[in-house]
Structures are given as structure tokens and as C-alpha cells.
Image (cartoon, rainbow, N blue to C red):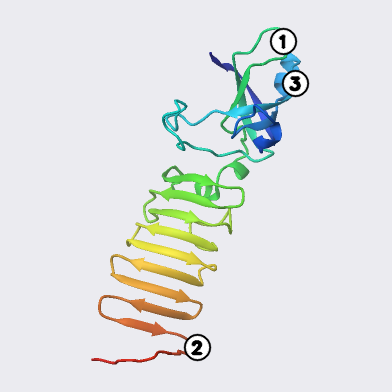
Amino acid sequence: MALDLSKCYRAKVIDSNYKHGGAGVAPGSVKVNVEDWNADSGKPAEIWAYPLNAFFVGSDTGKVKNSGQCIIPPIGSDVWVAWEDPVEGTDNGGIAWYFGSGGFNNRYTIPNENRTSGSPNEIYTLLQTPRGRTILMSDENGSSKIVIKGRGTATGPLVEGNNMALILDESNHNIITLQSGNGKQSIVINKDSNTTTITQGNSKITMDNSNINIETSGTINLKAGRINLNS
């Protein structure tokens, strides 16, 4: 069995749900349109292609299960396709495998963080979905952090302006931030100052080892069966 990488064709994903392919189509497969292959060989232009897994990720031995990487390219994506064991003189091109991205328009295929950073080579976007959900790591000086962002913006900066985010900030201070509601709701744990701050709109509670400070522009209500005050 040989994968012929000398004949790779650019293809466009036209169906990303393998269940539409019927029996024999494996999970992770996509249907692609390979017009150049069709022009060269006269073989069918629309085929189902298997995912070519990332190197050193997962196993096909059957001994390791539920391990690997699976990122299905959405409909409209450009990918590369190659064949394993094509059958000469027939319409059977062999097993088709897709991999990589064939898109060269960086405006759409490269996340904003990797285009606008002063040190884009130090921003590692592990994944950013078409709707903006993101997992990234930054080794950039002054912005060293790990960020998990929810849907909100696919073009915003690392943290600000996001609806939901979990940020492990190692830049100037060791800070863990859980943020929601466009920054109006947050829990911030600052390891260096040994404080925890809870913010809800215009109200804030800040705690350290000795004190609890409460700030609000509204009303503070206390309801309890019993209150003990000791100084």
C-alpha cells in the first residue's frame, strides 16, 4: 500500500458530514470536488476522502482508542487530496485522503491574533473555529498567556471584547481570569497580589488574606437566620 504524494490535487469540500456518504464512508471523511483530477484522468470529480491524521497523533493499531485529533474542514474549505493504491485503467482512483489547507488568502485562513501581533511567530493558535471559538497560547513578551475563548469574535484581540473567556495570564502578573458578559462579569485570581476579585456590572467584591472589600452603586441586602459580628 502506497500513498502517492507526487500527485496531490487541490480540492474543495462540498459535504462535511460523513453520514451523508452511506456505508463504507468512515467518520471524519468529507466529500470533495477535485476538478483538476477529473480533467487529468476523466475520473469522477466528486468523491469522499478519508482524513489523513496529524503525524504522531492517535493510533490505528486498535490498542489505543479515543486518542487523536479531529478537525473537520467546513464546506467551502480548500484541501489537498492524494490517493493510495489507484487501480490503473479504471475509474477506481484508490483510497482518497485529504489533508492540510489549500487556502492562500491569509485574510480568511489565518486567525487575527497571528496577523496583528508584533511577534506573530510567538502566537500559537491551536484552533479557531469559523464562529470564533479559540484555544491559543502566547509566548510573546508582555502578552504571555493561555486563552480559551468562547464564541463572540473571530477578529478581536486576545482577550478584550470577548463574551466568554478563560485566560491564564503569565505576562506581568500570574492571573487567572474567568470572563463573561463582555467583561461585565468576571472572576480574577491574582497569584502575585494574593487577591480574588468578583465583578458583576458595577458591583465588585475583592478578597485577600485579611480583608473583604465590597463596592456597589446599588443596594446591599443581607438575609440570614443569625448574624454574628466579632472584631
In this image, 59 relative to 14: left or right? Answer: left
First in sequence, mark 3 or 1: give its number: 3
Q: Is residue 123 above or below residue 158?
A: above
The x and y percentages for residue 111 are: 55, 47
- Point 26% across, 75% down: residue: 209
Q: Give the SS element for disc 3.
A: loop
Q: In the image, what residue type sits under mark 3?
A: Pro
In this image, 41 relative to 174: left or right? Answer: right
User: How far, Cα to Cα, is label 2 from label 3?
Assistant: 68 Å
First in sequence, mark 1 or 2: give its number: 1
Whether residue 117 is visible, yes or no, is no
Q: Give the SS element for disc 2.
A: loop
Q: In the image, what residue type sits under mark 2?
A: Gly
Q: In the image, what residue type sits under mark 1?
A: Thr
Residue 44 is tagged as: 3
- Point 49% across, 71% down: residue: 185
| Residue highlighted by disc 1 | 90
Residue 218 is tagged as: 2
The x and y percentages for residue 216 are: 45, 85
Q: Give the SS element for disc 1.
A: loop
At label 3, counting other C-alpha atoms closer than 10 Å, the crowd grade (few under 14, some 14-19, many 20 or more) is some
The x and y percentages for residue 204 are: 43, 79
- Point 35% across, 63% down: residue: 175
- Point 37% across, 56% down: residue: 142
User: How far, Cα to Cα, is label 3 from label 1?
Assistant: 11 Å
Between residue 176 and residue 44, name the one nearer to us: 44
Q: Where is residue 103, by image quadrant?
A: top right
